[in-house]
Amino acid sequence: MSTTISGPNTGTEAGSGTAPRLRRAVITGIGVVAPNGFDTDEYWDAVLQGRNGIDRVTRFDPAQYPTQLAGEVADYEVRKYIPGRLVPQTDQSTRLSLIAMDAAIGDSRLDLATVPEDQVGVATGISVGGLEYSQRELEKLWSLGSGHVSAYLSFSWFYAVNTGQISIRHGLHGPGAVLTGHTSGLEAIAQARRYVADGLPVAMCGAAESGMCPLGWAIELTTGRMSTVADRTRAYLPFDTAASGYLLGEGGAMLVVEEAGHARDRGARLYGEVAGHATTFDPRPGSGREPGLRRAIEFALADAGVTPADVDVVFADAAGVTELDRAEAAAITGVFGPRAVPVTAPKTMTGRLYAGSPAIDVATALLSLRHGIIPPMINVTDPVPSDQLDLVLGRPREVPVSTALVLARGEGLNSAMVLTAP
């Protein structure tokens, strides 16, 4: 099977049709922690102002590495947000996840005490896991003279601490999920939508990650796709003729998703609806077949019951890598036509946040729906003409926004999500 779609009520394969959706998933709370904003309001102001959160790495000395720039979350008082007993058991990924989830619950004004503890789902995305924690543990083992370490440590730790701590912190016993890969921030939100379709009134979801440690840096450098440009305004330039690769960042977003009737009954404020989603796999390398991103877009639109003409903005994956940017541009223009829809990538201000990137793109898209403003991408000055994209560059674009498409890609995996205004 080469292609799947994640319609929540049917579980059917793409193209086979979907039954009418009876239980709609709406977003009632957003929590953001990003390199250019420690909360949702600060982040939204930053992206509208084009404020760059990328600078030279400070978490460790990057002098020995070819890439020395990243988007780091500003220093914060850890114990203000994380119980003291948990601090030695957590690293930046889990701390950012807990902070963002607390903010999302507060923003939703949802009293979890009113919801049975087994009626709240939890789905968090994972890409790099707890690399910082793992490095710390590996250093301990090394100092003890152990010559054997396990790469599994990172993911087993992240599963137990990240998702588990969110559930424990809020007294939940509903289903939980950890999804792997760079698309998993989007997949986690899609999983929350499935929870709602399957009968849960509430699901908490999203992703916030960090790989700001020498171990994470060394692993990422093996891709050969990180930019080595020293100028922070010229290093990460997706869809630009000077594109030289991507930069990393840390952070992400958490969301509170509710069944529409549950949200309505308690008078909740709605940001939007998760109207459609699809995931596809790329064909085998060398097969000569088209990458799977275009199919993901088409299936997500079909799942949402909207046409390309209905979409007001596309939040691009924006790899900043020549061949990946050309493939994404071809997918977008193949569905929408040349310069037919505004395309943006606010991640040019933060770097790519691992699994947190698509989650924060969803949060940004929801804020665009609410405010009728498309935030820009920054630093891109010479778009590749053959891409034929209507890029939102330099300054926000004030237009009515009722439908947004968010794209994410990983190794051989493509994910697309349609969000609609309430």
Image (cartoon, rainbow, N blue to C red):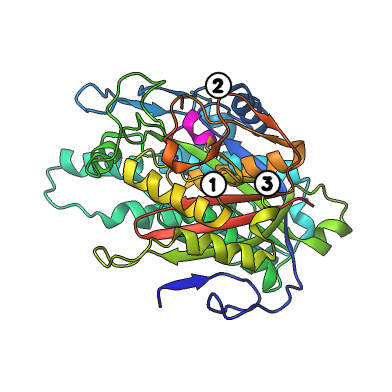
What is the CA distance from the residue labelled 3 to the residue labelled 1?
14 Å
Task: Please state the horizontal and vertical placement of residue 252, each as a whole percent of the image.
Answer: 53, 41
Q: Secondary structure at mark 1?
A: loop
Label 1: how many Cα within 10 Å (few below 14, some 14–19, many 20+): some
Mark 2 belongs to which amino acid?
Arg
- Give the numbered dot on residue 338: 1
Please name the residue shown 71% across and 73% down the image.
199
Q: Earlier in the sequence, mark 3 or mark 2?
A: 2
Task: Please state the horizontal and vertical placement of residue 74, each as a whole percent of the image.
Answer: 49, 24
Is residue 172 inside the magenta stretch? no
Q: Quadrant of the N terminus?
A: bottom left
Task: Please state the horizontal and vertical placement of residue 193, each as a whole percent of the image.
Answer: 64, 63
Q: Secondary structure at mark 2?
A: loop
Identify the residue under disc 2: 51
Label 3: how many Cα within 10 Å (few below 14, some 14–19, many 20+): many
Quarter-wise, where is residue 100 in the image?
top right
Image height of 145 relative to 279, above or below: above
Q: Which residues are magenta?
A: 346-353
Nearest to the observer: residue 60 or residue 139: 60
Q: Secondary structure at mark 3?
A: loop
Is residue 348 inside the magenta stretch? yes
Quarter-wise, where is residue 137 in the image?
top left
Quarter-wise, where is residue 222 in the image?
top left
Identify the residue under disc 3: 312
Label 2: how many Cα within 10 Å (few below 14, some 14–19, many 20+): some
- Which of the two discs, 3 and 2, sits closer to the camera? 3
